Amino acid sequence: MFRALGFGISTSFLFIPALFLGRQRCTVSAAEKNAKPNIAIIGAGIGGSSAAHFIRQLFGPEATVDVYEASDRIGGRLSTMEIAGKRFESGGSIIHKSNKYMGDFVEYLGLKKLKSSEPNSLLGIYNGEEFVFYGSRWKLVNFIKLVWRYGLFDLYAMDNFITKMLTNFSNIYDLQEKEQAFNTVPEMLRAMGGEKFYEYTQQTTRQTLENIGLNQLLIDELVTVVMRINYGQDVTLNGFAGAVSLAGSQGGLWSVEGGNWKVCDGLLSNSNATVYKNTKISEIVKGSHGSSAHPVYTLKSDSQIPERHYDVVIVAAPLEITDYYFDCKDCNNWPIPKDLGEFWRTIATFVHGQVNMTHFGFSTEDDIPEVIGTTETPMNFFNSVGKQEPVENRTEIDPKELPIRKIFSRSNLTALQLNRLFSRVDEMKVVSWLAYPHFTPPEKFWSFLLDDGVFFVNAIEYSASAMEMSAVSAKNAALLAHHYYSGKTSDEHINEKYSKPRSEL
């Protein structure tokens, strides 16, 4: 019942369950086996690489799959950086034990999971002046402290809410197994958990949790800490994203040895996709080809790319970010910049050094929490300070060596601010990135369909942004593409014909 409570808070993104992908049978019809569709995927992050994986499963070996990546590397917002001779996750860092898509990708690719040490982590909640909550590395003691401050009923209600949320979310995997797809995000959300799932995106996390009876202290402290760590925002972000964020407090977290980006690299390699790095697409041009009833698409870029007519294009890049935006003048439903939302900039400062124990009031090294979370107050110039684990060779860590800590903040730390947090800095590196949308409910969603044969993976992100969400959306885009190319009608396969999902909210 209380598995979600008190046993460590993640210092990265939270993700939710999915369905086994592995080695599914190909569902291409006999007629399609003679066709050789050309498919372009724009973006080589987790959305684009997952899309390549699903496209290959659905279209079979004859399809040509080209992936265009604007940067010089694969992985998108999954990345690592080096400090003090070791590499650490600098993007999406943590995967939940229930993340079946990510878990099965790892198994399929033969990668290795690294368990997080979060079950033994100590959490402190700092209000800018003092620790309003200081937990324990002993699970039972930690739980008692949580109950004492936040109340047994409220902790149970929050745990129950998260559990039901995850149960309802899993409906999507049954639907996708039946090859059912959705044109819009609200349709997908309603298929997962009924009208409530969509309603959560139209209200704040605070409103969502107040509606289930949680007290203000729990929301202002523990819940706010989780939001500030995972999304850099507070409890004004939408309730669905807030629930996704809270799901990670259930523990059982892990990451991929060598870096989570290796999942993207492996999926692209195993899908036999041709990847064009350093290739920024500037425009999609819609046209016709021969006697085909379907349009074809060509891509424009300043880089040298194939002169190819594509039957399907999957956009797996955040068009909200100016550097990634491109146009399609003749597409029926193409977003223009002013209609898109904004992405939230997160600053991750990695420090190899000594925490300023005087500033925080610690007496010994053991007093320093693995996770220092903060409340929403102007006095807190940082969101969190979290002890980090390298992406490889964890058994070779010298316990006497100063650890690496990652500070999340909304702006670059000044020298004065850094000196408040650390009494000694041997090395420091800063990663500034547009990590996820700025959630401002009521959320507005762009369609998964940008044109007849153009599909938008990143439309899902304004409900919640996470690796698992991208994989779900990539599967939906691949299904939409397959239905479109094979001539299956939307009445048969999309939207309204899904089975009524179970709902426990």
Image (spheres, helix red, strand yellow):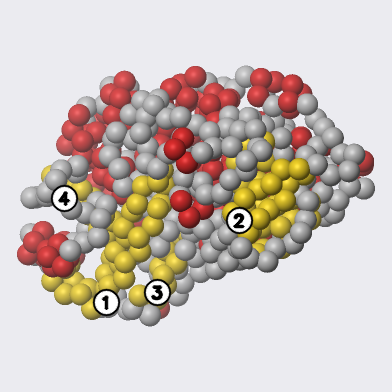
Q: Front-most of 316 and 3?
A: 316
Identify the residue shown where x is 66% and y is 20%: 496
Q: What count of labels does the image hold?
A: 4
| Dot label at residue 427 | 1
Q: Which residue is mark 3?
A: 82
Chain-order first, disc 3 or disc 2: 3
Check disc 1: other Cα within 10 Å, few if <14, some if 14-19, many if 20+: few
For the residue marked with disc 1, what is the amino acid? Glu
Chain-order first, disc 3 or disc 4: 3
Identify the residue shown where x is 29% and y is 33%: 236
342 versus 422 height, above or below = above
Identify the residue shown where x is 53% and y is 64%: 71
For the residue marked with disc 4, what is the amino acid? Asn
Q: Which residue is mark 2?
A: 281
263 versus 333 height, above or below = below
For the residue marked with disc 2, what is the amino acid? Ile
Q: Which residue is mark 4?
A: 380
Chain-order first, disc 2 or disc 1: 2
Q: Front-most of 247 and 345?
A: 345
Check disc 2: other Cα within 10 Å, few if <14, some if 14-19, many if 20+: many
